[in-house]
Image (spheres, rainbow, N blue to C red):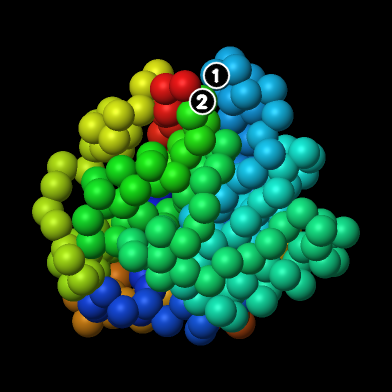
Amino acid sequence: MTDQQQTHQHGHRHGHGHDDAHMDWDVMAPLLELGAEVTSPIVDQAAVWLRERTEAAGLPKVRRLLDIGSGPGVGACQLARAFPEAEVVAVDGTPALLERTQARAAGLGLAERVRTHLADLPDGLATVGDADLIWSSMALHHIGDQESAVAGLGQALRPGGLLAIAEGGLPMRVLPRDIGFGRPGLHSRLDALNEDWFNEMRAGLPGAKEAVEDWPGFLAAAGLTDVRSRTFLVDLPAPLGADARAYVQAQLARQHEAAEERLDAEDRAALGRLLDPEDPQGLMRRPDVFLLSARTVHTAVKPA
Ligand SMILES: C[S@@+](CC[C@H](N)C(=O)[O-])C[C@H]1O[C@@H](n2cnc3c(N)ncnc32)[C@H](O)[C@@H]1O
């Protein structure tokens, strides 16, 4: 249940079920959406801080906000509520996710302010226009050259604007270290496999560039100032509600799919039990399943 870079906490990162850079974003849409809903406290908390940051930067009103790699639009709609004077543009390379975004915005009465823009990054950055606030959550690690993507976003900022990049954090935890069967520490072993998967995914990206993943350093190199990072928690204690439990089950199933061949027989058997909806010790039935995760948001200001 990794989420290294807390990258893809909402699903995608852990066990995408792929061993290369290709992601089936269409197929992942329901899981991305459920994950973003379940972990929505992270964006709500981050938005409060971003408001403080924009005000401190001398931007009392955010008029135009870009969400880069917006996925199904859960975060874009949260940000639209947090910045009620902003036009929010959800930018993504997957049409099906932008359709979900439109449907969500309409359902929440936000259709007037939440727009969508189809663009493949990094080249598509040239088409997104400028903004007072640019948010990007768990999308930039799908770009081969992350540092240059950050620089491109910095260029799109209006003077005095704020760039906020949610990448990294802590792997998601959903179970005790010892779950009563199998070898204790399954979580950590899955995390290690997920790290391998992540490395392979990044190595296969077009224009993949190896670099120290120093997001604050990337922001500073882009000419932005007042670089600050904060980490936000999603802490759903046991017993989990139905949506969070379904998300945990789906995430673990993806990890299982991605890592099955690399797990030893004991861990495979333990995961099989956890994923069996009929097993009283499975994720869908056991009372001790929780959800704890953290995502880091790196921010910086464009000099006026
Ligand atoms: C893990 S999801 C993150 C979704 C959302 N930001 C969130 O935090 O829940 C990554 C998103 O980035 C988009 N994406 C990945 N690579 C992209 C690219 N090269 N150009 C445009 N969008 C891309 C995917 O379509 C997907 O919606």
Residue for badge 1: 57
As displayed, is residue 230 above or below residue 238?
above
Residue 39 position, x and y percent, is 60, 51
Residue 81 in sight: yes
Tell me the quarter of the image containing the N terminus: bottom left
> What residue sits 14% from the left and 57% below the top?
209
As displayed, is residue 291 above or below residue 224?
below
The tag on residue 160 is 2
Q: For residue 81, which quarter of the picture?
A: top right
SS at mark 1 in the image: loop
Label 2: how many Cα within 10 Å (few below 14, some 14–19, many 20+): many
Residue 289 position, x and y percent, is 57, 56
Front position in the image: 1 or 35: 35
Is disc 1 in contact with disc 2, using a CB cutoff of under 8 Å?
A: yes
> What residue sits 16% from the left and 42% below the top?
212
Residue 192 in sight: no
Residue 129 position, x and y percent, is 52, 53
